[in-house]
Amino acid sequence: MVSTTAKNWSHRMSLSTTVKQSDLIPKGFTKYFKHSIYSPLLLTFFIISLSACQLQNHQLRPTGDLGVIIERATGSVQVVNTTQQEPLAKVDKLGDLSHASVVFSRDQRYAYVFARDGGLTKVDLLQDKIDHRIIQSGNSIGGAISQNGKWIAVSNYTPGGIKIFSSDTLELAADITATPLNTSTEKKAIYSKVVGLVDAPGNRFVFSLFDTNEIWVADYINQDNNKKWEIQKFTNIGKQPYDALITPSGRYYIAGLFGESGFALLDLWHLEKGVQRILPNYNNNKQTLPVYKMPHLEGWAVAGRYAFVPAVGQHSILVIDTDSWQQVATIPVHGQPVFAVARPDGRQVWVNFAYPNNDTIQVINTENYHIIHQFKPGPAVLHMSFTPKGEQLWLSVRDNNEVQVYDPATFKKSTTFPANSPSGIFFTSRAHQIGL
Amino acid sequence: MVRRFSSSFTLFFSLTLMTNSSLFAYGETNHRTPSIKKQQELLHLLKQDCGSCHGMLLKGGLGPPLLVKDLENKPIELIINTILYGRPGTAMPPWQGLLSTQDATWLAQQLKTGVIE
């Protein structure tokens, strides 16, 4: 998007390229321009307005090809442009970004940055500055923006639960406390940590409770002037859901289980069916390996009807048929996968790994499950993001303090630029994706 | 001559004792510290990789906070054991194989004294 005034200016400028300059000046003005004693004054006026026009044009910044890169150690973000493949600006004082994520307003003007220390910051991408900032909890893990763009929900570890804010002012709209872990009145209450928060069609938020094995659906009810968030709870969904995702259509919510083998699946079209367990045996009869970093499911790759998912405690990617919800293959990989990210056309899945294999990337061909490319971008590759049409893959190399951009068709690196301990890479195209 | 021998013997004896005791009781001595380079690597690991669950400032996340005040009632042996062998039933993995007993001991001492804070 562009701001209204900026749009007008750009319209005028585009006219000037196709129409002769003299045609831009109305006839009445030409008369004055030629004959009046005001002509020097008018000439000055036009020169000033034209230079203002150029200045304004220079400052125009469409936001559709922008992105935000988290600099985790310095609490700052870089605003980047994916057409130019370069950083544009830095915005700092965003708090502890050691585990940070970002969602965007539906007009792609604002980035909402969720920080580890409970900070929620609304960053203006047109002006490279903080628009609003609050500390909303003691410890948080991520968030989502509602379908209509009006609400920002944040999932919190301390105190466990979610909070919902107005996306405009960041005023608190709802405070939903998770299930308490201790019932003693003497002790300070501790609530379950909340993970895997997504937005779902119908202005709903869906999330999982790590310590109490639940999935909750928060639904915004606005009936007869009675506005409230109604919660539906699903219990005993499986041990320790550690993260979750929603399928691209917004229909299925799937939580990965850490405490046992398998996933918990909820059909959001048919909540009455309850939670179904899928792949309950993928880890059975196998020795599970230590997990030095929890896999992330937000980047769960759905290519065609198949989903490519990191296994927990196995050095493999699981392939799941999303029609039958059965496992169809296991692809051995280089280490404990953290992110499995599908190129937007679904033909490749790129995988990065947990410590101590986090210097390597593998690329899987989704037709035959072969590893078609493997390379080492540098120490501690934390995140990967495709541009919306998939012609670029950006990745962050934390311990080299750099961001690298690749052409996924040739695997050639097109550019590298410095960033301070970079982690998450988030493009504004996320504004129009269900679930984020 | 006799005196010199005696003092050398004492030194030798006490060193042997300390070395032995450090093998059995982690917390008492600190004579086998990792090299400076290794220490830097371990601090980096603590901040960045342990930090992915415990927070980069060790104020907690999916894992509990590891600040001095959170660990003051925990014996150092418990911390070393937790690092090396993990905590079954939780997300804490065993670091044995990636970290030596010496590394784990040094890290536990840093946590106890709050060096990273």
Image: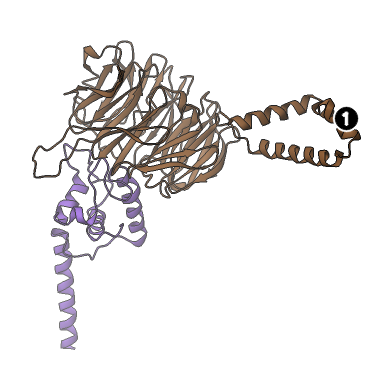
Chain colours: A brown, B purple
Q: Residue at x 49, y 19 (%)?
A: A345
Q: Report the amino acid beneath label 1.
A: Lys
Q: Is residue B105 above or below residue A313?
A: below
Label 1: how many residues lie within 10 Å, few (<14), some (14-19) or many (20+)?
few
- Residue B92: image quadrant is top left
- Residue A190: image quadrant is top left
**Residue A407 visible in image:** yes
Q: Nearer the viewer, residue B7 or B82?
A: B82
Count of numbered labels shown in the rendering? 1
Counting from the top left corner in percent of width and height, residue A282 is at 24, 22
Mark 1 highlights which residue? A31
Q: Is residue A49 left or right of residue A78?
A: right
Q: Is residue A403 left or right of residue B9?
A: right
Q: Is residue B49 above or below residue A65?
A: below
Where the N terminus of chain A falls, by quadrant?
A: top right
Q: Is residue B87 left or right of residue A429?
A: left
Q: Nearer the viewer, residue B35 or A310?
A: A310
- Element at badge 1? helix
Counting from the top left corner in percent of width and height, residue B99 is at 27, 50
Q: Nearer the viewer, residue A407 or A59?
A: A59
Counting from the top left corner in percent of width and height, residue A19 is at 80, 24
Q: Residue at x 9, y 41 (%)?
A: A185
Parent chain of label 1: A
Q: Nearer the viewer, residue B71 or A383?
A: B71
**Residue A331 visible in image:** no
Counting from the top left corner in percent of width and height, residue A243 is at 29, 30
